[in-house]
Image: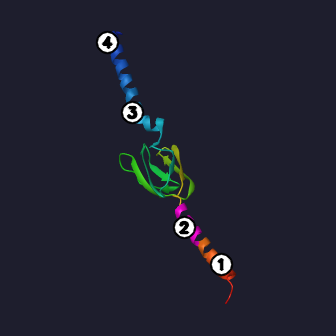
Amino acid sequence: MLPYRESKFTKIILVIFFILVLGYAYFEGRDIIFGPAISIENRVMNVDQPFITIEGSAHRIASLRMNGQMIPVTEDGAFSEPYLLAPGYNRITLNASDRYNKSAERVIEIIYTPPSTSSGQADATHSTSREQASSTSSAIAPEE
């Protein structure tokens, strides 16, 4: 039997082996380390249309919910979900969870201002004032 000799070559091989083991452990454990991620373009916006589409991508997830309702996600993590806004302030919450019970949440705040119908209201006001004026003038007119 040969006696054990410590050599530089053995140390280099062991260092390379442990670096490879640590690299593989990082690769396999990145889901646990980083958890789910949601990326969306605009998180705060003003719109004048009542119907919008929420689009983005989610990575390392098992499920994705929008305001508590499950929404579908493609294999590459993209999602696109239509949403009908109420006039005024709207808050949409996206919640993603992974298989290790980690979660991520993103909030989208949208202010929907419906187009003003001031011209329609002005026409109605003018016609109402004309009707009132004609009824007033007929009431004041002397009877023959």
CA gap, disc 4 and disc 2: 93 Å
Q: Kindly tell me whether residue 3 is visible in this rendering.
A: no
Foreground label between 1 and 4: 1
The quadrant in which residue 127 appears is bottom right
Residue behind mark 2: 123
Q: Is residue 142 left or right of residue 81?
A: right
Q: Nearer the viewer, residue 98 or 123?
A: 123
Residue type of the residue flagged with mark 2? Asp
Q: Residue furthest front?
A: 144
Name which residue type carries label 4.
Answer: Phe
Is the residue 11 above or below the residue 121 in the image? above
Q: Which mark is residue 27?
A: 3
Between marks 2 and 3, how big is the CA–CA gap? Answer: 68 Å
Looking at the rendered structure, the number of numbered marks drawn on it comes to 4
Nearer the observer, disc 3 or disc 1?
1
What kind of element bears circle 4? helix
Q: Tell which of 140 and 63 is nearer to you.
A: 140
Of labels 3 and 4, earlier in sequence is 4
State whether residue 82 appears in this view. Answer: yes
Secondary structure beneath label 1:
helix
Question: Residue 137, labelled with which disc?
Answer: 1
Residue 9's label in the rendered image is: 4
**x then y, percent, for residue 80:** 41, 52
Q: Mark 3, mark 4: which one is toward the viewer?
A: 3
